[in-house]
Image: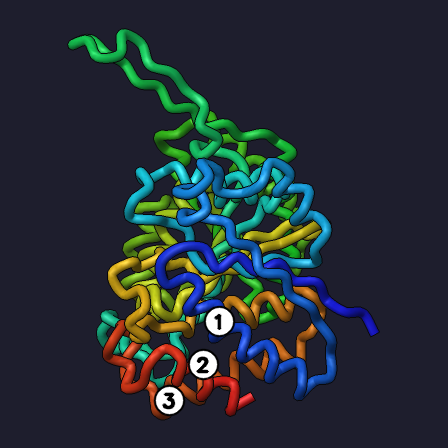
Amino acid sequence: MKKHKIAVIGGDGTGPEVVAEGLKVLAAASKKFGFEYETEMLDWGGERYMKTGKMMPDDGIEILKKFDVIYLGAVGHPKVKPGILEKGLLLKMRFELQQYINLRPVKLYPGVWTPIKDKGPEDIDYVVVRENNEGLYMGMGEFKNKGAKDEVAIQTSYNTRAGVERCIRYAFEFTRKRNKRKQLTLCGKTNVLTYAWDLWERTFYEVAKDFPDVKTDYAHVDATCMWMVKNPEWFDVIVTDNMFGDIITDLAAMTQGGMGIAAGGNINPEGVSMFEPIGGSAPKYTGKNVINPLAAICSLGMLLSNIGEEEAATAVEKAVMAATAGKIKSMSAGKMGMGTTEVGDYIASLI
């Protein structure tokens, strides 16, 4: 029996707290379904940066390549200027480990409040596939006459045919495997962004020829935002670029109950992937035992699926659904009806 090697990065703020509850659930799943694993805790993040000037060792990426998967809590420290940790740790891992897919399930669980009137769990159940290594987030651009009245700032969206195609092909394969409505929606802005989105659209319909069983459609990103609120049941799987994906998944998280329940994965289908709750480090709640760990637990479920423990992954999701339909009163910090550690214990007991 293979022993899964898991790198655990608690990170900043409440990150270590929610990860600890996910690890409780991992232990319960391992005992129930008979798989073995080992974890290594890595103290990478804001505190390390404050002490040493480095958020990870110089050979950090090579260290991570020795693991099967990464479990991340949160990145973001109130004493570190925004952007430093994100670029030096989170984006560094995503880019250098070629985690070119960001996978975001958007699912409203029973008992969870949504701000969308007259919509329930049967209406909000889709997945966003976001390109994760290219686009505007590559940091390409320049200033001209910086600081002057005629200053110009140029930010470049860099898209390659290879990068776009691998993302789109993954989305088609995922839609086929998901086997729900088997409908893939391309979300873009072809009417204005006529270079990048010309490439995306052409590639999308060329790849579609290899998947005749998958229905396709297209929506501008602004229309997508409207329909995510008005008619979320229209969507099965959405594929989009890095920037648009970042924006629409936060909107999607609110429709499924908030950041407390929203999980995500950064996927390298051929290498080391990373799973995390999509909310921030929430430093104001650190140490108060009030933060909601369900997003971290749901991301643990995604991690289990990634390493081939499908039964365990299904059991984790069913346990979370039973909890939201049962004792947990709210997704908001401090309003769950129990503390962070109690939620972890409760979910573990339901496995």
Please give the residue where the numbered disc 2 appears in the rendered image. 344
- Amino acid under disc 2: Gly
Residue 252 or residue 330, whichever sits in front: 330
Measuring from the top left, give residue 299's x and y in whole percent. 51, 67
Q: Is residue 339 left or right of residue 137?
A: left
User: Label 2 crowding class (10 Å Cα cut-off): few <14, some 14-19, many 20+?
Assistant: many
Q: Secondary structure at mark 2?
A: helix
Q: Is residue 196 left or right of residue 255?
A: right
Residue occupying image coordinates x 47% and y 75%: 21
Q: How far is the residue under mark 2 from the one under mark 3?
A: 16 Å
Measuring from the top left, give residue 258's x and y in whole percent. 31, 67
Residues tagged 3 and 1 counted as in contact (Cβ below 8 A):
no
Measuring from the top left, give residue 139's x and y in whole percent. 44, 28
Please give the residue where the numbered disc 1 appears in the rendered image. 20
Q: Secondary structure at mark 3?
A: loop
How many badges with numbers are in the image?
Answer: 3
Q: Quadrant of residue 141?
A: top left
Please give the residue where the numbered disc 3 appears in the rendered image. 325
Residue occupying image coordinates x 58% and y 83%: 315
Task: Kindly give the residue lying farthest to the left in the view shown.
Answer: 149
